[in-house]
Image (tube, rainbow, N blue to C red):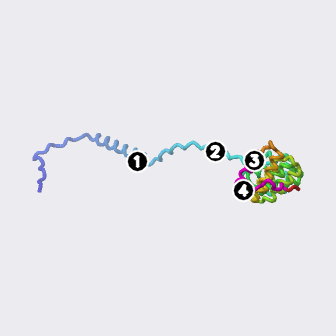
Amino acid sequence: MAKKARLPINPAPVQQRPAWIGFAVTGLIAAACGAAISASILPKAAPPKAAPVAAIAPVAPTPPAAPAAETNAPAQTAAGMPPPQLVMDLPPAKIALNMGNWSYDQKNWQIAIAYYQEAIQRGLNSPDVLTDLGNAYRFSGQPQKALNQYFLAQKKNPAHETSLYNQGDVYASDLGDAKKGVAIWKEYLTKFPNGVHHEQAAHWIEITEAHSGANTSNAPAAPTQ
């Protein structure tokens, strides 16, 4: 066990400090403690507030389109909306025709049919409108109704090319009557040797005859109304 260090036999006397030094040291310690306590008691300064965010202006609602003139066709259900100029400040017959054309371009055949029918009932029954109605019938799977409209267009104007050419398409492609279709196209080439569908008619005559192998030289012409 380690021994404790011995004190000297004759220790040196401790030097006495003046009394005023003790009071001064005590005062300094008290002041320091008071400052520390005050600092801990005082509330901390609040952090600076963030600048307010500018308010977002509400988006103005899109103004509704001007109501179209009343028509008997069903409400438009195609994706998107037709341009306002198709219906604004126009007579009902023209609105029906424009909406028929627009629905046709959107491939909404049943809606196009309804609008074309209304346009025709209101007096816009030109061969072009009749042919477009026939096309809509054809694309909706109603080839016989399509033919009826093509016949009406030809009766109204025998010089209307497309209504005659389209008859060949319906017979050959939709009704499976290749001979009748080729006969119509040959009739077309005879009536319109420089017609806008001349190349298509000649092409389909060649293709159809090559595949069917039928003699179509005596095929009957398309019926008329």
Residue 201 falls within the magenta-colored stretch:
yes
Q: Nearer the viewer, residue 84 or 173?
A: 173
Can residue 111 be seen in the rendering of this structure? no
Q: Nearer the viewer, mark 3 or mark 1?
A: 3
Residue 173 position (above or below residue 60):
below
Instruction: Say which residue label 2 marks.
Output: 55
Instruction: Say which residue label 1 marks.
Output: 37
* Residue 146 place in picture, x, y as percent: 80, 56
Mark 1: give few (<14), some (14-19) or many (20+) Cα within 10 Å.
Answer: few
* Residue 119 place in picture, x, y as percent: 85, 52
Mark 2 vs mark 1: which is more N-terminal? 1
| Quarter of the figure with residue 23 | top left
Mark 2–mark 1 contact, CB under 8 Å?
no
Q: Nearer the viewer, residue 107 or 222?
A: 222
Q: Nearer the viewer, mark 3 or mark 2?
A: 3
Residue type indicated by callout 1: Ile
Instruction: Say which residue label 3 marks.
Output: 202
* Residue 45 place in picture, x, y as percent: 49, 44
Marks 2 and 4, Cα distance to the nearest angstrom?
Answer: 78 Å
| Quarter of the figure with the C terminus | bottom right
Marks 3 and 1, Cα distance to the nearest angstrom?
Answer: 109 Å
Residue type indicated by callout 4: Gly
Residue type indicated by callout 3: Ala
Q: Which residues are magenta?
A: 200-222
